[in-house]
Amino acid sequence: MNRPLQWRSFSNHAFHEASFDIRTAAQPTALPYSSLGHAETTMYTVARTSAIFRAQVTRTAATTSHLRARRHRMWSVELEKDHKFKSPSEIIDPAMIDRLLEESKEKAKDRPLVREILAKARERAQLRGVPRGEDEHEYVQGLDLADAAVLLNIDTQDPASKPILDELQATALDIKRQIYGNRIVLFAPLYLANYCVNSCTYCAFRGQNKHIGRSALTKDQLVAEVEALQKLGHRRLLVLTGEHPKYTFDQFLDALHTIKGVETKPCGKIRRLNVEIPALSVSDFRRLKATDCVGTYTLFQETYDPRVYKRYHPSGPKSDYGHRLLTMDRAQTAGIDDVGIGALFGLTDYKSEVMGLLQHAHHLDKTYHAGPHTISIPRLQPADSAPDAIAPPSPVNDDDFRKLVAVLRCAVPYTGMILSTRESADMRRELLNMGISQMSAGSKTDVGSYHKEKMQADENHTQVDGGAKSLEQFQLQDHRSVDEIIGELIGDGFLPSFCTACYRKNRTGEAFMKIAKTGKIQDFCHPNSLLTLQEYLIDYASPETRVAGEQLIDKESKTISENAQRALKRKLDKVKAGERDLFF
Ligand code: SAM
Ligand code: SF4
């Protein structure tokens, strides 16, 4: 698609509007970057958004120093007016969360009541009792907030809780199997740039960190990086960047097209690009959508508690809680209907964060008929010069972390749950049995590290101890190769999948939710997963993984109907004969 897009760029004192083809345009000049340090004002109301829009198109107003300062700090400026969204306090209600968690403390000790809630979770994920003629997808709704609060309050440190925690875990795993089968979708993160104007107190990329080496991938480096990922077997990437005028949204859009064009034999191209990039305006979400190459847009709220949000995000565009919370509403408004949410565990009480995730998910589901496509559960890891990563304010222990994953699976059965290599190999293995459906493999969080080329660090930043600078966002705990992870998954009875078919068959947003909520993902995903695994085994697997994988394909092929088996066999034979990228 070569659709020219309207592009408005800001220079120091003037506003320009130009017709711009995002595929062919040269990189725009980096905007000047004024110093940070004071808070952004909130921008979530229509009135304010409109006011900003009017101010931007008015040359006189645009020259005021206040607007200039704000404009230069924002990665994505709103050019549309009159979008009406709920206010953040209608979406996330901290007082209600506190009340429900308080009220459920005693209830959590009532074992028969907890068992009733677990039975309800199974029931609601299994579509029992749907009145005839009713829209059945409406009935797979998981748990309400009050029930989720009870489960969250089970005391993991009390030895007497062990049996009920085992039941919680079994329920979560059954629900996951019911909806997602035994598939685990694999992906890798790809960091484009680590410049950032924000001040997140837990992240090594924050602007205040003068120790870290800063860099952005050049086009050649990006191509090399994608080739390296393809040679590991990856088909699905999560593309990330910090927020800084040295790496603009236009450069990012250009990078997406570069990634999409990279092709190595025998794997071919990357087939799904998910993105985790700074909060965008509706107008820029439309431009993202127009690239026609983005799957899920992901953004973590980090903490859902508006009372402490500012403490962890003292300055920069991200310091605006409301603007960040409404990001998914802006995405949906612009037609990006697969969105991924997440909370960074370790900043505040984990129970409140899970409740915040659920309130956010319910809002999206109710408003757009599509709950979040994915929920991520990053847990704080040590990071260079990031005080709250070195000493997390509310650390979540492993027992509570296992429990919260299981509660989320029971509460939102239809949503994919993502686990990254922030967690250790052992922890990841355990969490797979609590409802995780996607995980990263062979990940790196330092810019350019897949192709191992030494990145040229920015001259403005000082060397650490005169030695090589770290480029890593935070420390990873699982350093195993993709092949090792796949080997372990197969050994544990899981089906590793590189499938990207739903998005390419337009099974996204509400359409995907209808399939997911009625428990029908299996019909498509199971054979598609087997096809992608077959490709991986032929093209990239070690001999041991290949043997184990062939046996798994053989076994799993027999779990589908005879008709489906015949259709699958035809496609598997084609893959063995050299065809690639086949799916149902
Ligand atoms: N810069 C964008 C943003 O913040 O929205 C894009 C995502 S950022 C590159 C990826 C995510 O990493 C953040 O949203 C945050 O939750 C997570 N993160 C940052 N520091 C971390 C740490 N020390 N440990 C674990 N996760 C961390
Ligand atoms: Fe920047 Fe994102 Fe890191 Fe915050 S979490 S400092 S916004 S890269």
Image (cartoon, grey):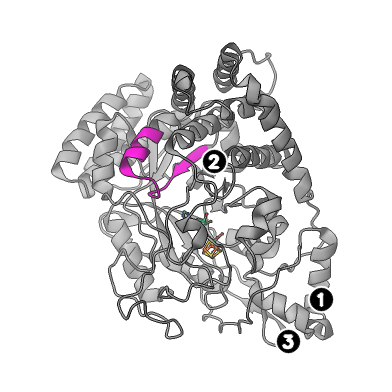
In which quadrant is the C terminus drawn? Answer: top left
Disc 3 to disc 1, C-alpha distance: 12 Å
Q: Is residue 233 above or below residue 67?
A: above
In x, y percent, where is residue 475?
Answer: 38, 57
Which residue is at 76% across, 78% downward?
A: 67
- What's the residue type where badge 2 is placed? Arg
Q: Specify which label sits upstream in the sequence, 3 or 1.
A: 3
Q: CA distance from mark 1 to mark 2?
A: 39 Å
Picture residue at 81% right of the left edge, 58% below the top = 45
Q: Give the quarter of the image for residue 564.
A: top left
Residue at 76 percent across and 84 percent down: it is 65
N-term mark: 3 or 2:
3
Where does the magenta region start and end? 416-431
Cα distance in 3D space between marks 3 and 2: 43 Å
Q: Which mark is residue 471?
A: none
- Name the outermost residue toward the left: 543
| Residue 213 image-quadrant placement | bottom left
Sequence order check, earlier mark of 1 and 2: 1
Which mark is in front, 1 or 2? 1
Pick whichever, 224 or 579, lies toward us: 224
Q: In terms of depth relative to the viewer, which is nearer, 560 or 425?
A: 425
In the rendered view, tell whether residue 37 sits above or below residue 107.
Answer: below
Helix, strand or loop under label 1:
helix
Amino acid on which the number 1 mark rests in the picture:
Ala
Task: Tell whether 124 sits left or right of 222.
Answer: right
Question: What number is the disc on residue 55?
Answer: 1
The residue tagged 2 is 507
The local secondary structure at tag 3 comes to loop
Q: Is residue 358 magenta?
A: no
Q: Quickly name the residue at label 3.
A: 14
